[in-house]
Image (cartoon, rainbow, N blue to C red):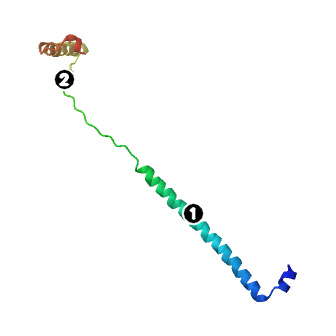
Amino acid sequence: MNFLQNNVPQNLQKITGYLIVLLIFGLVLSSFAITLSYLAYAKNQSDQVSTRQINVSGEGKVAVKPDIATFTASVVTQAEKVRTAQEENAQRSNRIIEFTKAQGVAEKDLK
């Protein structure tokens, strides 16, 4: 390598150095340009994919006569003796059941 440096003029060595730096700089810039063009292409492709859609919406209405009703009742009795409270609760519960049957509720529908 010393042989080449000794036989090549000083100006030509400088120009060669500048050309090598310029070549490396050009390679770096071209790699950035290729990367940017790929990113632009990928974004364009993703925009095209997102615009292909199918939107469907609908609404429906149904009107029927109600056939189920829920009613909850509690019977609470306080008494000094348990037996007295149980008997009174049974009487009150039976009156509630009799009332609902009198209103037209079938026994099979009572729980």
Q: What's the residue at 51%, 56% (across, down)?
A: 42
Q: Is residue 15 above or below residue 70?
A: below
Q: What's the residue at 76%, 84% (across, down)?
A: 13
Residue 30, by quadrant, is bottom right
| Amino acid, disc 1 | Thr
Tag 1's secondary structure?
Answer: helix
According to the picture, the residue beneath numbered tag 2 turns out to be 66
Q: What's the residue at 81%, 85% (across, down)?
A: 8
The quadrant of the image that shows the C terminus is top left
Looking at the image, residue 35 sits to the left or right of residue 103; the answer is: right
According to the picture, the residue beneath numbered tag 1 turns out to be 35
User: Along the polypeptide, which appears first: circle 1 or circle 2?
Assistant: 1
Q: Residue furthest left?
A: 102
Q: How many marks?
A: 2
| Amino acid, disc 2 | Pro
Please name which of the two marks, 1 or 2, marks the residue nearer to the observer: 1
Q: Is residue 22 above or below residue 7?
A: above
